[in-house]
Image (cartoon, rainbow, N blue to C red):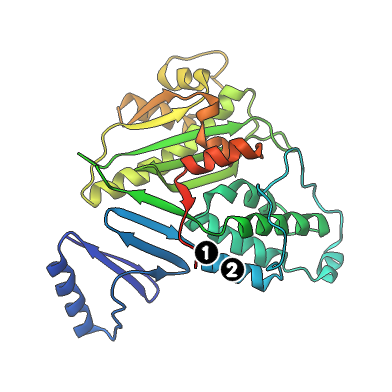
Amino acid sequence: MVLLTVYVDDITITGNNNDDIEKACDELKQRFEMTDLGQLKSILGIQVDVKGNVVTMSQQGYVEVLLDKFNMVDCNPVSTPEVIGQVLKPSKLKPSEVKALNLPYRELVGSLQYLVTCTRPDIANAVRNLSKHLSCYDESHWKQAKRVLRYLKGTKSLCLKIDYTGQVGAFQVEAYCDADFANSEDRRSISGFLVMFLGCCLSARSRKQTMVTLSTAEAEYIALCDLVKELLWYIELLEELGFPQRSIVVHCDNQSAIAIAKNPGHHERTKHISTKYHIVRDQVEKGRIQLQYCPTKLMIADILTKAIPREQFEILRSKMGLADGPTN
């Protein structure tokens, strides 16, 4: 089997047989004008290193470009992307006043979001907070955006690592899900979840929920819904690639939310929850999702919902699969 991933004119080719890969490359070259760059080392700003059974992906070069572009090369590093308890309030400036500031705020936030999408899920919550103010911002928002750059300067060598060494049997994903109850001025909660594979983060999300929930259990249940929708896509993709998934383990740190998902009965305290959110219950009943309780201290997704102390932040960051890689 040969797999091709295509983004505009960038193509990566992989498979389980080198002869098949070479044959596919030759056939493509006969039809299209192509340049074979050999072993994958870099694509779309992502540096890839393959050594034996270990694959690492980083964006150190991309971070260095950002630091230079936004005049932060000589900044002082910080240990976390956010300050605990700091709230970014909406700017009171008029559109004309925002324009007069001449700050490349949107450009920086967009660049940071690309990092989140690819290899740096540890800054997801910070970037989500910054993204709320793209239409109207001021110096306080710009200062917080630069703090994320200061954090990246001190951690630019971090990379996502997947280690296949000793892997026996089927490749199985697992997931973590959390929510921060009523953590916003409009009292809507924050969902955070990540999908893991061999101890490495495949995808991570930090987003504000679309409805106001009445309890922490309800907020966690809504977050589970967001995660399950993501997992259903992964299940279909992995099955298509030849990696059928057994019941995927989802770690949740709220016993009440787990009880809601496992009990299909009609309850006075949950009857108002929209039907669409009960996709969680449906997938649990079908056996495609298996919910397991996880103590809050071990909940990796906690890093995606709020600012946390440095010690805990570094522990959870490492559990996401982020580790120091080789420096340039």
13 w.r.t. 146: above or below: below
Q: Quadrant of residue 313?
A: top right
* Mark 1 neighbour class, 10 Å CA radius: few under 14, some 14 to 19, many 20 or more: many
Residue 83 in the image: state x and y as whole percent. 73, 44
Relative placement, left or right, of 210 versus 95 is left
The answer to whether residue 137 is visible is: yes
302 w.r.t. 327: above or below: above
Q: Quadrant of the N terminus?
A: bottom left
Residue 161 in the image: state x and y as whole percent. 40, 51
Residue ID for mark 2: 64
Q: Secondary structure at mark 1?
A: helix
* Mark 2 neighbour class, 10 Å CA radius: few under 14, some 14 to 19, many 20 or more: some
Q: What is the tally of numbered marks visible in this picture? A: 2
Relative placement, left or right, of 5 versus 327 is left
Residue 44 in the image: state x and y as whole percent. 45, 69
Label 1–label 2 contact, CB within 8 A: yes
Residue shown at 54% from the left, 19% from the top: 270
Residue shown at 32% from the left, 53% from the top: 54
Relative placement, left or right, of 314 versus 107 is left
- Closest to the observer, 286 or 151: 151
38 w.r.t. 85: above or below: below
Residue 197 in the image: state x and y as whole percent. 36, 44
Q: Quadrant of residue 137?
A: bottom right
Residue shown at 12% from the left, 69% from the top: 19
* Residue type beneath disc 2: Glu
Q: Which mark is residue 261?
A: none
Q: CA distance from mark 1 to mark 2?
A: 6 Å
Residue shown at 66% from the left, 64% from the top: 108
Relative placement, left or right, of 245 versus 317 is left
Residue ID for mark 1: 60
* Residue type beneath disc 1: Gln
Q: Residue furthest front?
A: 327
